[in-house]
Image: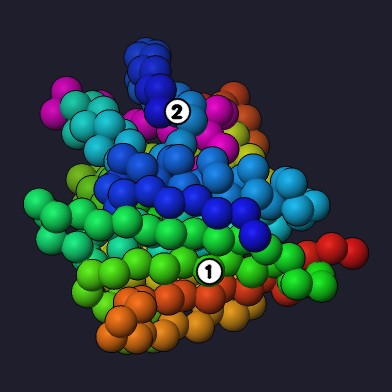
């Protein structure tokens, strides 16, 4: 497992996506799939940084990456307020410019760019998101 | 992210390099607002050096497109790398924006 731990601050997002870029390369993903995972994890961590911790008390985000067979798995753990991606409504990406609402794309990207996103909460362990990109090594 | 502004006779070109995410998007927003304040009516945003864009970056672009539409301004985009284009397509932005391969093509059609 390749691990990374960082404070949940918006200015750390580039460090997180750099870690994902390096991990996907090390584990043999092609550039396009590696980019998908980068954006999906970047959006997830942006939401955690914005909503899970109070402004003056930012906690940590722990990220682990591994391959299971042909699947690339990312596990994101954090304390703080729970954030279930299934509770966010999907944006209408076919709406015209006039009708298009600003926002809502982060969770949509997270789910669309990964094949599976599973959220769980445990009172002791905190929040855990398991994100899977399938059939990465061909 | 690095931003470069080029003021041509009737058009301004914003060239972007690096990452556009929630931390860097305010820079783009500021440049856009600056051009709007100056009364520039035609803008090309050139993504020539952009290798990463997130929803935070798209949010600023959508607001700019809405402002352009209501203010009778013209906004064109160009030079999106394949990964960045993929994100635009996923978001439905390829039907909202006029996107060109090169700056020359965007300038020709503005």
In the picture shown, does residue B13 fall above or below A13? above
Q: Residue furthest front?
A: A124
Q: Chain of mark 2?
A: B
Magenta highlight range: B36-53
Q: Residue furthest right?
A: A138
| Residue in front for this viewpoint, A102 or A132 | A132
Q: Position of residue A107 (x, y in %)?
A: 41, 71
Residue at numbered disc 1: A75
Q: Chain of mark 1?
A: A
Residue at numbered disc 2: B16
Q: Which residue is at 64% across, 69% downward? A: A73
Main secondary-structure element of the magenta-colored stretch: strand
User: Can residue B88 be seen by looking at this rendering?
Assistant: no
Q: Which residue is at 35% across, 31% downward? A: B42
Q: Which residue is at 46% across, 66% downward? A: A76
In the picture shown, does residue A57 fall above or below A92? above
| Residue in front for this viewpoint, A91 or B75 | A91
Q: Is residue A112 magenta?
A: no
In the picture shown, does residue A102 fall above or below A9? below
Q: Which mark is residue B80?
A: none
């Amino acid at each position: 497992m390749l691990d990374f731990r960082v404070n949940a601050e918006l200015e750390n997002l580039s460090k997180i996506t750099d870690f994902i870029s390096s991990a996907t390369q090390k584990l043999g993903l092609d550039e396009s799939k590696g980019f998908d995972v980068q954006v999906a994890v970047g959006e997830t961590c942006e939401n955690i940084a914005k909503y899970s911790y109070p402004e003056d008390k930012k906690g940590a985000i722990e990220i682990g990456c591994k391959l299971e067979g042909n699947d690339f798995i990312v596990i994101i753990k954090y304390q703080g307020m729970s954030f279930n991606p299934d509770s966010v409504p999907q944006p209408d990406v076919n709406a015209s410019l006039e009708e298009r609402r600003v926002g809502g794309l982060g969770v949509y990207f997270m789910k669309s760019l990964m094949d599976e996103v599973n959220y769980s909460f445990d009172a002791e362990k905190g929040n855990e998101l398991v994100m899977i990109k399938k059939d990465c090594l061909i | 992210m690095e931003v470069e502004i080029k003021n041509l006779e009737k058009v301004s070109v914003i060239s972007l390099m690096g990452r556009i995410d929630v931390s860097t998007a305010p820079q783009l927003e500021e440049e856009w607002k600056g051009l709007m304040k100056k009364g520039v009516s035609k803008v090309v945003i050139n993504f020539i050096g952009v290798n990463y864009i997130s929803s935070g970056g798209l949010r600023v672009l959508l607001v700019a497109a809405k402002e352009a539409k209501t203010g009778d301004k013209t906004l064109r985009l160009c030079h999106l790398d394949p990964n960045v284009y993929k994100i635009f397509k996923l978001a439905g932005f390829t039907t909202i924006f006029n996107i060109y391969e090169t700056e020359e093509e965007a300038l020709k059609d503005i």
